[in-house]
Every structure is written in C-alpha cells, then in structure tokens.
Image: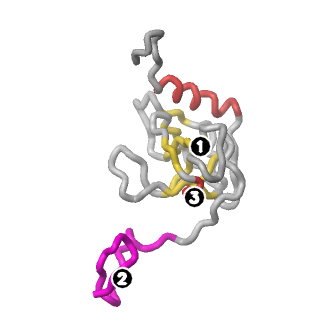
Amino acid sequence: MASDTREGTLRLAGRRLPAAEQAAPPRHTIRATPVIRNVYSCGFPQAALPPEFSKRRPVIIVSYKNSLTGPILVVPVTTQPQPGNAWAVKLARNPTPGETCEVWVVCNHLYSVSCQRLSATHGLVPRLTVAEFRPIHELIVKWIPALDPEGDIS
C-alpha cells in the first residue's frame, strides 16, 4: 500500500481514484478584487450536506469591501426551479456567458468564501445591473433578523 497526500488516505498502488475524488482541472485564480454584483464561478466543497450547495456553480458577490486575501460574501445561483421558495429570486436573464437556461438566486444561502474558490466564467466576469441586484439585496436584508431597540432579535 502507498500513502496518498489526500488526508493521509492509504491507496493500493496502480488503483484509479473514484471519479468524485479525481483532481479537477486547474483553474486560474482571479487577479482583481471581486466587486459587488459581479458573477463568478465558485467551487463549493463536494462534501456539503443538504441543504448546503455543492459543486462548481455561479455565485453573485454581495459584500462590497473585498480584498483578494479576505473572505467574500456570495449567494449561489441555481438552475433548479424554486417554486414556493420565498427566498429565491428568478433572474430575467442568465448572467453566465453563453448560457440561456432559467436561473434563480437563493438569497437565504449566504456563503463566506475565499477568493481562491472563485474563477471567471469562460474568461469573463459579468456584472448584474443595479435593477437586477436590488431584489436580491432586499431579500437578503429581509432574511437577516432585525434587532429591536433593546437588542432582542424579533
């Protein structure tokens, strides 16, 4: 048996890794600081548990004071229809370059991610308009509990 660098797992020499464990092709890390309303491709962990999001998918940047070394706040975009989900916004257009399928932004799934998880989609970084972003922002603010004057969560 040979030791593998993946979390100290022991593997038999000559055995192929299962498809889920094979290394993904290298992606170019972003070089410019992400800006609010920008759309990136984000590599979520494969080991996510429902209802967490997993795999590579588009995300929208919702934090506005970002750096390449700090955390970035994002919301995921999905092609899974969201009927009855009061926290999802259907976009009028798919912001991913070359894609035309319907998409929803799931606004109650805020994620703090590293810039190393982000990459441009097909070499482009699209940006939502203020009008497209406004309903997303409104739902995020509505989802976060408000404090009453005494500091209790309402």
Residue drawn at point x = 52 percent, y = 49 percent: 113
Amino acid identity at mark 3: Gln
Give, as a single range, the part of the protein colored magenta.
1-24
Against 90, residue 4 (above or below) is below
Residue drawn at point x = 49 percent, y = 39 percent: 110
Relative image position of residue 35 (x, y in whole percent)? 68, 43
Q: Does the stretch in magenta take in 15?
A: yes
Q: Most prominent secondary structure in the magenta stretch?
A: loop
Q: Nearer the viewer, mark 3 or mark 2?
A: 3
| Quarter in which the C terminus is drawn | top left
Residue drawn at point x = 65 percent, y = 52 percent: 68
Residue drawn at point x = 46 percent, y = 16 percent: 147
Query: What's the distance in space between the residues labelled 1 and 3, CA to CA?
Result: 15 Å
In the picture, the disc for residue 60 is 1
Relative image position of residue 37 (x, y in whole percent)? 66, 40
Relative image position of residue 117 (x, y in whole percent)? 55, 57
Q: Residues within 10 Å of mark 3 (few under 14, many from 20)?
A: some
Q: Secondary structure at mark 1?
A: strand
Q: What residue did someone put label 2 on?
A: 16
Decide which of tag 1 and tag 2 comes sooner along the chain: 2
Q: What residue did someone put label 3 on?
A: 116
Amino acid identity at mark 2: Arg
Q: Residues within 10 Å of mark 2 (few under 14, many from 20)?
A: few
28 left or right, relative to 11:
right
Question: Are dots 1 and 2 in contact, CB under 8 Å?
Answer: no
